[in-house]
Image (cartoon, grey):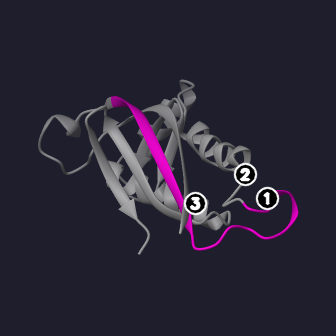
Amino acid sequence: MYGLKTEAAFDSAHFLADYYGKCENLHGHRWRVVVYLQQEELQKESTMRDMVLDFGVFKKAVRDLAEELDHTFLVEDGTLQQATIVALESEGFSLTVLPFRTTAENLARYFGERLIEQGLPVSQVDMYETPNNCAIWMRG
């Protein structure tokens, strides 16, 4: 069994609808995402012979995805009135509307699934909401 690991970070704001605590209010995080790849065998051909995946390809895929969410307001679809979204966008704010509650657990899964769609053999994603707290998604 072979594996690789890389990480990236992004800053974004969010809130948790239907949550009763501090996180129901708009706040931000310096998210840190750690992605693990795993496969039984190394590649056998071409420039990636004897590799799981070229680190450059791996790092770029993870960092590009982090860049999509960097300095945006992560919004769970349906939690803000359309007029609020229009008002925020008209003020120049960058919003990323997602089809799930913007918890660390769901963001970890989102990264994993998006990278798997690109053909990466993702086994696990750790999404750090703070330096000491992370949610873990493992491919099942």
Spatial CA span between label 2 and label 3: 18 Å
Q: Amino acid at mark 2?
A: Asp
Against 120, is 125 above or below? above
Q: Residue at x 50, y 51 (%)?
A: 35
* Image location of residue 139, percent across then percent down: 44, 69
Q: Is residue 134 visible?
A: yes
Q: Which residues are magenta?
A: 28-50
* Image location of residue 121, percent across then percent down: 59, 66
In this view, the mark in front (3 or 1): 1
Q: Residue at x 32, y 38 (%)?
A: 129
Specify the label residue 114 is tagged with.
3
In this view, the mark in front (2 or 3): 2
Task: Look at mark 2 in the image and give the residue it sits on.
Answer: 54
Q: Residue at x 85, y 57 (%)?
A: 47
Against 28, is 120 above or below? below
Q: Is residue 118 magenta?
A: no
Spatial CA span between label 1 and label 2: 6 Å
Task: Look at mark 1 in the image and give the residue it sits on.
Answer: 48
Q: Amino acid at mark 1?
A: Met
Q: Residues within 10 Å of mark 1 (few under 14, many from 20)?
A: few
Comes first in the chain, label 2 or label 3: 2
Q: Are marks 1 and 2 in contact (CB under 8 Å)?
A: yes
**SS for callout 3:** helix
Comes first in the chain, label 1 or label 2: 1
**SS for callout 1:** helix
Q: Residues within 10 Å of mark 3 (few under 14, many from 20)?
A: some
Q: Amino acid at mark 3?
A: Arg
Q: Is residue 131 left or right of residue 91?
A: left
Q: Is residue 77 visible?
A: no
